[in-house]
Image: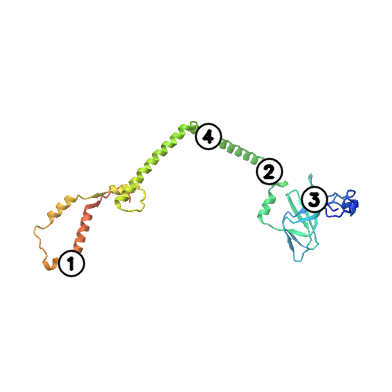
Amino acid sequence: MQGFNMGRYVPPDLEGTASGNNIHKKRAPGTLRKDGTQTVRFEMPYAVFCHTCKPAQIIGQGVRFNAVKTKVGNYFSTPIWQFKLKHTACGGAIEITTDPKNTAYIVTKGGKARDYGDHDDRARKEGEGGVPILTAEERERRRDDAFAQLEGKVDEKQAVKDNSKRIEELYRSGERDWDDPWTANKRMRTSFRHERKARKREDDATEALKARLGTDNDLLPGTEEDATRAKLVTFGDVESEARSNAANKALFEKRPSSSHSSAPSKVAKETRKDALRRQLVGNTRATLDPFADF
């Protein structure tokens, strides 16, 4: 009987006594050979161009292959592994080697890694947790530059000290403001009540002004400039203006004939209009303030 996902046939008379790999004289995947190689399932870490294909074809990131894993060296105590796989489309061999120094994979034979631009370079320069990976020269230079490192630590300590003071001040302020929640809530409700009444008075005054003007348009809130301009405007006295007009008017004036009194002429209308304009201008006067800047 053939087991689930085993891939090799086992006759019924040999079931339980031998495995499919022993019967077909095959080695199970992942078994370490005598020469130190091992067949593993390898997944492409990035897109790779296959040079055996004509024209070159791209193998996408994440495609899996059965690869022969071999140890080819060490970087300090970290082993360097080489993965040799076969492209199923053309049968060409591709070799990929690990790079512990830069925490990356390098295509050494049969293909070329796809260039992702600056993002890929930044990713290779940063290790786990965003910690930069330093070369031996950079580590030596930082080790020699002890004074710069000391200054950096002093600045960091001062920044931490200032931040701690600010945090303590914020904690004390919060505790002081909310030490008595009932008093703080009462103070907030009182201020809100006063502001609400002030807004109510302003709304009532605006509605009264709109009713007096006979308009439904929204009125903008008054400003200091509007109040100053209103104070500088004065209106004349109607009774004094009437007495002045009566004094300046002739005692006896000629009345128009009956032929011209039936319909006032255009000249008479314009005369009355000019008189009304002069009266309005005379009654309303804007006081000039030499210190006002308009």
281 left or right of 183?
left
Q: How many marks?
A: 4
The reply to whether dot 3 and dot 2 touch (C-beta < 8 Å) is: no
The reply to whether dot 3 and dot 4 touch (C-beta < 8 Å) is: no
The disc label shown at residue 265, or none:
1
Distance between mark 3 and mark 1 Cα atoms? 115 Å
In front: label 1 or label 2: 1
Q: Helix, strand or loop at disc 1?
A: loop
Few, some or many residues within 10 Å of mark 3 (<14, 14–19, 20+): some
Q: Residue furthest top?
A: 180
Amino acid type for the residue under numbered disc 4: Glu
Q: Residue furthest left?
A: 252
**Percent position of residue 148, x then y:** 64, 41
Residue at image coords 67%, 45%: 129
Q: Helix, strand or loop at disc 4?
A: helix
Distance between mark 2 and mark 4 Cα atoms? 37 Å
The disc label shown at residue 142, or none:
2
Q: Helix, strand or loop at disc 2?
A: helix
Q: Earlier in the sequence, mark 3 or mark 4?
A: 3
Distance between mark 3 and mark 2 Cα atoms? 31 Å
